Amino acid sequence: MITRELALALRDAGLVWHPAEGDRFQLDLPDEAEPEAEAEIYTVSTMTIEARRTPTGTILAFNGTTEWALDAVTLGDAVWLPREDQLRDLLRGTFRRLVRLDDAFRVEIEIAGARWGFEHPDPSEAYGRALLALVRRAY
């Protein structure tokens, strides 16, 4: 799983999240939530936390299963933690390969004919770093 810091960087760079069943996220409510609540990892699921489309945007509705009083949050109050397969899919046609090194994984992408490599011991983090480079280049 990618780090919260990388997830925030992806969001801040312009990555848009369309919540789907099984997506993981953390809260980003620095003025309203206890640190433990922000550290918790939640999963979108129709039984517990459901993505609801409203006229003002998408909210994540907590269906009474959390330990503390929280009815709903906006997408802006959540930090998406994409899975490895989601990160790879978001790289689309730029993805070239994933290579296992002695102590890390290397994700290689190609942008405008130039190859780029991103290494990390966790393959999800390597994919996320590659996606961050791609998103930053797009904006």
Image (cartoon, rainbow, N blue to C red):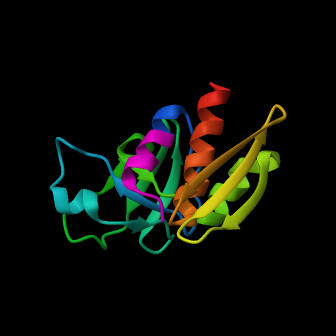
Q: Residue at x 62, y 35 (%)?
A: 135
- Check residue 99 for magenta coloring: no
Q: In the figure, 27 relative to 45: above or below?
A: above
Assign the magenta stretch its main secondary structure.
Answer: helix
Would you say residue 41 is visible in this rendering?
Answer: yes
Question: From the viewer's perspective, is 31 left or right of 126?
Answer: left
Q: Relative to the observer, which residue lies in front, 10 or 129? A: 129
Of 39 and 57, the residue lying toward us: 39
**Above or below — where is 114 with respect to 71?**
above
Please name the residue shown 31% across and 73% down the image.
Answer: 65
What x and y, as percent, mark residue 103?
A: 53, 70
Identify the residue at horizontal 56%, vertical 62% (top origin): 124
Using residue 12 as the reference point, say whether residue 126 is left or right of it.
right
Magenta region: 1-10
- Taking depth in this image into account, of 115 and 64 the one nearest to the observer is 115
- The percent coordinates of residue 96 (x first, y second) are 80, 54
Figure quadrant of the C terminus: top right
**Relative to residue 34, is residue 132 depicted above or below?**
above
- Kindly indicate the quadrant of the structure image that contains residue 136: top right
Res. 83 in view = no
Residue 97: which quarter of the image?
bottom right
In the orientation shown, which residue stands out farthest toward the top?
139
Q: Which residue appears at 21% of the width and 43% of the height?
A: 30
Residue 73 horizontal/vertical position (percent) = 35, 49
Give the side of residue 119 with respect to residue 138, left or right.
left
Image quarter for residue 37?
bottom left
